[in-house]
Image (spheres, grey):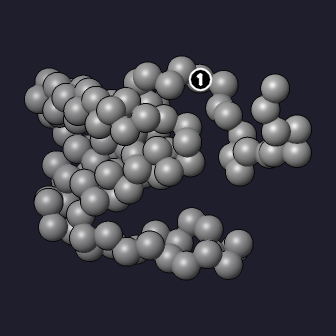
Amino acid sequence: MGHTSWNALFNTPGHPEFPAAHAYVSAAFESALTSVFGDNFKFTLNSYGYLGLPARTYNSFAEMSKEMADSRVFEGIHYQASCDKARIAGNKVAQNILSQIEF
């Protein structure tokens, strides 16, 4: 059954679909960095420049976090709802930590 010559563009990761781990962690990262640098912090990432891919510029950590979550949907690894709920949970966890610990 199926197409014998078909290959997935990305490997299927060995972790649950829900909650989407990348979206969860990136949202927590978003909250932590936003608490330090604020909502309007423009920055550029060039993680894959060595592969010839262009740099990505963001106007906020929320914009970066959303794109990280969306990438998992585009790759077919997670559903949008899983990423959306994971981002909410990740932000809540980070906010809880930030409210309990003084840096």
Q: Where on the picture, by quarter, is residue 80? A: top left
Q: Residue at x 40, y 50 (%)?
A: 70
**The N terminus sits in image quarter:** top right
* Amino acid marked by disc 1: His
User: What x and y, as percent, mark residue 97?
Assistant: 21, 27
- Furthest toward the front, the residue is 1
Q: Residue 10, can we see it?
A: yes
Residue 53 image offset from top left, x and y in percent: 61, 75
Residue 90 shows in the view:
no
Q: Which residue is mark 1?
A: 15
Residue sitting at x 59%, y 23%: 15
The residue sitting at 17% across, 32% down in the picture is 95
Residue at the image point whose x is 24% and y is 63% from the top: 60
Q: Position of residue 19 (x, y in %)?
A: 41, 24
16 over 87 or under it: above or below: above
Q: Secondary structure at mark 1?
A: loop
Q: Indicate the position of residue 63 as horizontal and vertical percent values.
A: 28, 59
Q: In this picture, is 66 found above or below 43? A: above
Looking at the rendered image, the quarter that the C terminus falls into is top left
> In this picture, is 34 found above or below 81?
below
Please state which of residues 59 and 74 is positioned toward the viewer in this rendering.
74
Q: Residues within 10 Å of mark 1 (few under 14, many from 20)?
A: few
Q: How many marks?
A: 1
Examine the image and state in which quarter residue 56 appears. Answer: bottom left
Q: Is residue 19 above or below residue 43?
A: above
